[in-house]
Amino acid sequence: MIARILATARIEANIARRNRWVLIAVLLMVVFSLVLSAAGSAPTGALGADRLSVVVASLTSLSVYLVPLVALLMSFDAIAGEVERGTLPLLLTYPVARWEVLAGKLLAHVAILIVALVAGYGSAALIAILNDAEAVAGLGALWRLTWTSVLLGATFLGIGYAVSALSRRASGAAGLAIGVWLGLVVLYDLGLLAAVVADDGGFFTTQVFPAALLANPADAFRLFNLSAAEASAAASGVAGAAGAIPQWQSLGSVVIWPFLALALAALTFRKVDA
Amino acid sequence: MTSTLTISRLTKSFGGVHALTDVSLTVTPGERVALLGHNGAGKSTLMKIILGLISPDSGEISVCGATPGDAEARERVAYLPENAAFHSALTGLEQITFYMRLRGVDLKGARDLLGRVGLGDAATRRLGTYSKGMRQRVGLAQALIGHPRLLVLDEPTSGLDPVSRRDFYELLDGLAAEGAAILLSSHALTEVEARTDRLLILSGGRMVAEGSLSDLRSEAALPVALHVTAINGYASELMEAFPNAIQTKEGLHLTCAQDDKLATLARISEMRGKVADLEVIPPSLEDIYSHFSRRDGQ
């Protein structure tokens, strides 16, 4: 079992390396992290927080968009590509279970994501610490951001596999993946904010809105990191409005979502005919 | 000896269309069986059921004593798809190593395996640069991993040149000698004739014929064709003797039943002085094949 999962992970890592996905993911994370840490270095003194904590707050807002995008880009081809190339029937005649195939792909993609995250966050942290020795105090926040980012990535990898299994064509899966990203990461928040504004402090704002934030993996990720961070004052928007949500709830959502998404992926993959 | 593959009364339909109807067959260890039939006859459906990729509507099937698709069955069955496809970014060696890992086989034999199918030099090149014939050979190499008890080969020689085909059948002979059962589908009737022990003909989802070539030949009882070339000027006299013959530019073309063959030859030899040449043409494999595959109102 382990050998078959590792074999699949290895071949997927090879494919991702050849297809430049590793390079693209790492470059994307590093460039954006550096840009943010450069842009976010100005207001430190006024906030009374260390430099790294401020950078982490900026990185959180960035990761909410970037981590799901990178995860979906890596995963949309995972099953649809196999179906389209015609490699799936042969693979399924091998003594390997479908969930093992999925686990192998997940392992490879999560590993690539970790490399990209460590490279991106690491370079931002390095610059912050080099400029301000006190920034070491923010390492805890950075660590929290890193592992929650991995969980957020795993969630969107799972969603990407499910999308891939559902559409069965790589082009369709790519379109659907972008749609999912727009919907969950961009439009969801806009819709919530619009509703909150229209509702003006009524039932929706007090009851539905917190639950809606927790239900979305990207929002839960942002909530958890910002509510845990000292520098939450540097953040604006959704997080400020939902400050009342207890931290254990957002943590629960962050932890549960990867399992939900991967179960969804396994279910949809099971329905794909060879 | 117990059979490696046993199928009885297998039926499968897709949305009301009967893909397979009441198909029964067995393949024993060391036996090479060819599955013939035109496009849509049900060959691929039958193979996919044997591999456990799709499940039948009714009927029984046992692969090495297990149900198709079971872990046990999958460990003993190898498959070569019709158009073997692989990820173009990988090298032949990486792809084969991956398949060996899935089967839990010692990886040391990877290069030897590629060498056996004539890809030793291309092992570290990307599959995207391979020709169709080379990809087919990668497909064949993966089917040889781990001494399978049953090989299911869908059009294995398509895309191979004549020399590679001969090498391929030599490989099969070796596997069969070691006790592997082989079920292969093909359009290339002449090579199947010489290289397999038994033929199965599927038509419209039904098994319409089964047996060795000579069995099928006598069962079909197709007429023998005789081509008689007359010595100059005697053609019309020959035509009078054989009124059923068709006169062509080169001579006379006549047909007779298998049983009448010797009598007809005797009559021709009586006219020795008028006949320049005689050619006897037995029904070809193609004729026998079309006879069986058309019989069911096709």
Image: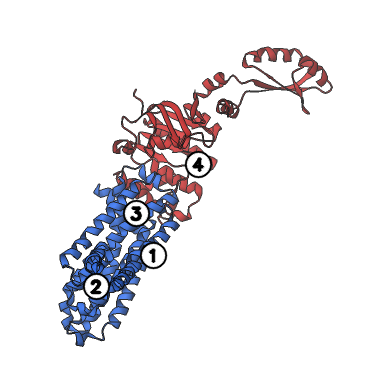
Helix, strand or loop at label 1? It is: loop
Label 1 is placed on what type of residue? Arg
Q: From mark 2 to mark 4, how far is it between C-alphas?
A: 78 Å
Q: From mark 3 to mark 1, how far is it between C-alphas?
A: 23 Å
Q: Which residue is tagged 3? A: A162
Label 4 is placed on what type of residue? Ser
- Mark closer to the chain start, 2 or 1: 1
User: Comparing marks 2 and 3, which lies closer to the viewer?
Assistant: 2
Q: Who's the residue at 40% across and 51% down the image?
A: A82
Label the red chain with its letter. B
Q: From mark 2 to mark 3, how far is it between C-alphas?
A: 37 Å
Q: Which residue is tagged 1? A: A20
Helix, strand or loop at label 4? It is: helix
Task: Residue B221 in the image: state x and y as whole percent.
Answer: 59, 19
Task: Residue A5 in the image: state x and y as whole percent.
Answer: 28, 51
- The chain containing the residue under callout 2 comes to A
- The chain containing the residue under callout 3 comes to A
Q: Which residue is tagged 4? A: B164
Task: Residue A126 in the image: state x and y as whole percent.
Answer: 23, 78
